[in-house]
Amino acid sequence: MSRDDDHTATDLSHLRGGETARNHDARTIAALTANPGCARRGVMDAAAVDKDAVARHLGFGAPFGQSQFAITRGNAFEAQVKADGCAELLALLRDGLGLDIPEVAYDDLESVGTESREVRHTRTRHLMARALESGEGTMFDHPLLRLDIAGQRAYLEPDVIAFQLGGRFHVVEVKSFAVVDGQAEPEQVAAAARQSAVYVLALRELVADLGHDPERVSHEVFLVCPENFSNRPTATPVDVRPQLAVVRRQLARLTRAEDIARDMPDGLTFALDDALPEAVRSVEARYAPECMSSCEMALFCRDEARACGATGTLGRSVRDELGGVDSVVTALDLARGVREPSEDMAETAEQLRVAARLRHEALAAAPAPAVPARDAAAPLVGVPAHGAGVLERTA
Amino acid sequence: MSAAVTSPAVEANRVVEAVLADLAKDHRGVVVDSPPGAGKSTLVVRAAAHLARAGERLMIVAQTNEQVDDLIDRIAEEHPDLTIGRLSAAGYVASERVTAHAAVRVALKADDIADRTIVIATAAKWATLTDGSWPWAIVDEAYQMRSDMLLRIAGRFERALFVGDPGQLDPFSTVEVERWAGLSWDPMRSAVSVLLAHNPELPVHRLPVSWRLPASAAPVVSQAFYPFTGFRSGTGPQDRRLELGAGGMGTSYDRAVEEAAASGWALYELPARHTLRTDSEAVQATAALAVRMLQRGPVAHSERGEAPVGADRIAVGAAHRDQVAAIRLALGPYADGITVDTANRLQGREYDVTVVLHPLSGRRDATAFHLESGRLCVLASRHRHACLVVARAGIPELLDAHPSAEPVRLGVPVKFPDGWEANQAVLARLGEHRVRADA
Amino acid sequence: MSTLTALAQLEAIASGRAQPVATVRHCHLSETPLVMIPLKLAGEAAAPLATMLGTDRNAPTLLVVPQPRNRDLRFGYAAELAKAVVEHVEAERGATETLEPSKDGEERFRYERAPQIIVPNRGSVGFLRLLGRSTRFRSTEGPWAVDPAVPMLGRWLTWFADRNDRPGSSVLLTLTETLRLHWATGQSSLEDGNLAALMGWIDPPEGMDGPSAAARAEDPVVSPPAGPATDPTFDNEVLAPAIAAFDESGGEPRAEERIRAAVASQLIPTWDLAWRALDLLRALPEGASVPKRWERDRDSFTYFHREFAESPPQAKLDDAVRAARRLHDLERSQESYEAQRAFDDPLVMAEQRLAGQAFGGMVTESEPTRLDESGKRPKLRPYVRIRTEDPVRLDEGATVVNAARPGLKGRVVEIDGQDVLLELTGGMGRKQTPEPGVVPEPGQRVVFTSRTADSWGASKFPEREDTPWTHGGPPAEYEPADEDATEVWS
């Protein structure tokens, strides 16, 4: 039928140039949806390149550090929710959401000793198969799932719980951001929903593989978060159908990375050597400021985009406002009327010229503000005393 | 055709009967979802007469003065024995459609038309009343009304019939505030969504047949915008025909007009380019297609008989107001007869032929605004015969590159259909009717 | 976003400095604003770590919770913060003006002044809102009693944060957003969210340009974040060991001093930057409508302050009626704020001109005494012809008003190429001849716009107890619950 169906696994692993493959997890898979138009990111992800290592090698390591306070808090919360065979979680689902939960068998699938991931995955399969047959109440903590990412086998080790209720599995995701009066940070919820969608997808594949209806994995996941300002957990159902559609779409799309990779100069790889900058630059990026929150390469790409004066560094809406003019210099020349616009830029040029005239007119009429000189005093030093404001300037 | 398939008329009538039967039961409210052209106004007129004949006084709530006048005209026409009061704001000049009927009285105050069986006004006007109560209300275009408006008028009625199209544009606000996200009474949500959140037991009916959309359009619109409920066309492929009286000159405009006349759809494709919103080429093409359609002397053949398609039966739709202004300008002398408006203002309207400037044409990045499924749904479902879409090439790539990082708010129901999917579905269909612009 | 702002950003890139996008200041600036820079503990919703605050740039107060997980220390901090905020509120009242009584004969008052809080960014507002939420329900009696100032703080912070939602309000301003309203930089809005980077473009240090100052600002070591989140490296390498030492010492003053010093090092750069930002904003002349909007802020302050003692804390969630009313108020504010800004500032009006909704140019012809005699009685209807280069996108018949004199109204008669013929319809006085100087004369430059704030009549809403069945009926009355007073804050 379609090209994708008889397509064998796309293998771009040679592009890593011998470097270790990065293990995909739900976060990195969810990140695939962030900027699907970027060829550079697409190729590097499809080849499982360690983008963080690449960015650091290029001198643009991303400062994605995490505070130990946040880590401690997250771990403590999760441990609390899962303690005693998820006793607190069960109570929450029963009382908080009014679910009619019978006796539940709890299995922790956390790795045992030096067990390989494949063995662990087999164990997950085995238990899932049994649960699907019986349809009884079951909770699997740390199931090890598998998903094919552009032909690469990725293992997912979610902290989540797969929870069977009335013959349907639900994903339970524990997050440590607060839900205050029923509301939480929309970006954080969105990230959690995307990750959960990856788990739902992987669980569905497993269920289908075991010969059952994949719909036995619900599109409704339970997000468990601290309530208000306490450590008490609260559970909120989240419908992840939109995220499922997006993740599925982007995973299907990754195979196209092969076409892009074909255009790369022969022999170039993303090995951490001298040729790395050339290799990276040979694949076009589609930088937007939003990349900063989702892609390890963002600082490099921003620097590159700024260096070539791309209007995209100002944001998607600014670029759109400039109707197609990609270059800062061109746009300014058009605005100043010192460059004859090509036919396809004529309209934007006209708009920019009018804008320039209006700006000039308005600013010419306004008096320049008298900006005070910077405070002559030296900066504050020392520690303000408790309560009383005695902080001294050194001058 | 197999005998097991009920005719559309029978199927639609069955739903209407069920709605009327529900009015007699003791539900506080009844909701009717009506896809484009499914006989919403007919239902409103029929239900109004039905309630009035049962001896109930009733109020009707519409969203715009235009809609109020349309409804008055239809009710008075079909039921001249019913007395109607039109409540209006100062400054309203009664249109001919209203003054033509002897049974209609226009008043600024409700007291002046207290004797009327049916009192009808815009929601905004109803919201100025602080007393008075009607046993029944019919709320038209209830999905386009914000829930805060419903809050302000709900004290005026005991029970209500809510009628509207869930696939069209959601109501919006000029301010961005998150504080009510997830609340069942969020004032920014639609009236129906809040009503049902608080009264989940209310019966919801769905009108199953679009009498407006031709057989070429109903399945596309149904699948793209009403994926879970669906509807069908009231007419078969042979029932509608658009005949061009005058010959063309073989230009790409002519070919697009011919394609649309023959198949019900045409995609007039301009070369890929990132442009300003008021892309002059696209604006020119949109205007030119509308004019060319008119010049080709189109005659509509349908279940209603045969009628020439005049300028008043052609509409041009776009996403933004500046585009609308630019298209009006480009239409020049034709601008008077042809309706040109934004999707928001075209909601609820019907034409024989529409020409649409695709919201994503020439954009470098798709935004939530451009992807909103309701916008495309309105634009792609106004026509009885044919819809011509003008777009720059490259929209599939644009959709492909669209980052999906929409924030998620707890407790807010997921919106279907997804704008991305709906855009893909419509585009896939349009792709079969592509005419490339002459170089 | 508009092409004008986009162009200003391009010019910023080319010149290496931020470029103005306003010619006047569109917010009120108090003479003694309370600058507040709050920090919170990472990973928690609203666990305060520290706040630097004060109305004197040379004498900030630093409040610190040396062990943010300790409930007593946290409430001690909240009480001190409360005192500082309430003190500011009380100090900024000024005299009480007595106004005309309302229609129903009620006495009305307005305080001469109102308090103003300045915070670095949007995150700070969210944090203050949560801090307000977590403190306003606290009980001052019983086993969980807190200092009476704590719930007061909660209610005031909630008032400030709610007011901040309102377009055009100045009682709680964020510096990043306020600066962006007046300057455009050569970086994206995302990067402008960093106060130091934004200030780097507007006011780079000696010997630096915008890009280099902004680059420097992105290094958290040189330029600590403006909060409320702290730099993770600072947390891990400085703060965590200091807090651990504090815990080990059993709360020794020296150990506490170490934490205070660490936190101060993170806050002082932002503190200086905030005052510098205020200098820059203050240097702009105030927009003509700013006092009118500040008056609304003063009204709200007066009402809240006078009712304070008698009122319960603000509800956790707006009920249906409250929500609808609030949305209505916000939309009205938004509309008048946008209209006022354009009338106050030719650079904002330029947006409307670029969009074709307004136009400006030179008057070429004027018939100031023209009368329309088609009706029963002749009406004064002067004609004015204006030559413009603007891309006018108005329909004939469109209503417009003069930008410099919004009272002067007109109607577009015809647009012929670059010539717009207007018929003036109002705002010229009551006589058959216009008041002198009102009708523009040939040679005069004028701007007319079609965008005017609609006049809104007072809108009616049901009473809370009349909430209709469509919205779930009347909500239950709020009863202060023990649960709220004792709500864990950990």
Image: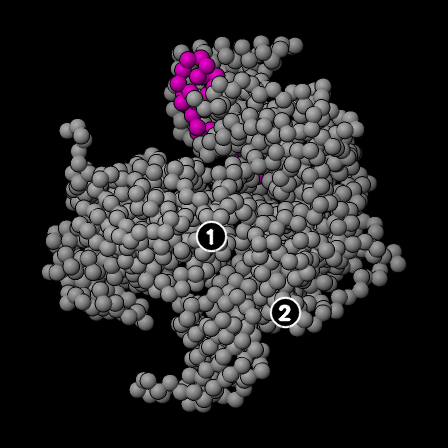
Amino acid under label 1? Ala
Tag 1: Cα neighbours inside 10 Å, few (<14), some, or many (≥20)?
A: many
Quarter of the figure with residue C302: bottom right
Q: Are marks 1 and 2 in contact (CB under 8 Å)?
A: no
Identify the secondary structure beneath mark 1. helix
Give the percent coordinates (x, y) of residue B74.
19, 57
| C468 displayed left or right of C484 | left
User: Residue farthest to the right?
Assistant: A395
Give the percent coordinates (x, y) of residue A160.
54, 24
Q: Circle 1 sits on which residue?
A: B282
Amino acid under label 2? Ala
Q: Image height check: is C28 above or below B242?
A: below
Give the percent coordinates (x, y) of residue C46.
61, 42
Q: Chain of mark 1?
A: B
Residue C247 visible within the image: no
Q: Are marks 1 and 2 on the same chain?
A: no
Where does the N terminus of chain A fall, quadrant-wise?
top left
Q: Residue at x 47, y 62 (%)?
A: C332
Give the percent coordinates (x, y) of residue A58.
76, 33
Q: Nearer the viewer, residue A35 or A114?
A: A35
Range of residues picked out in magenta? A204-231
Q: Circle 2 sits on which residue?
A: A362
| C187 displayed left or right of C341 | right
Residue C250 magenta-highlighted: no
Where does the C terminus of chain A fall, quadrant-wise?
bottom right
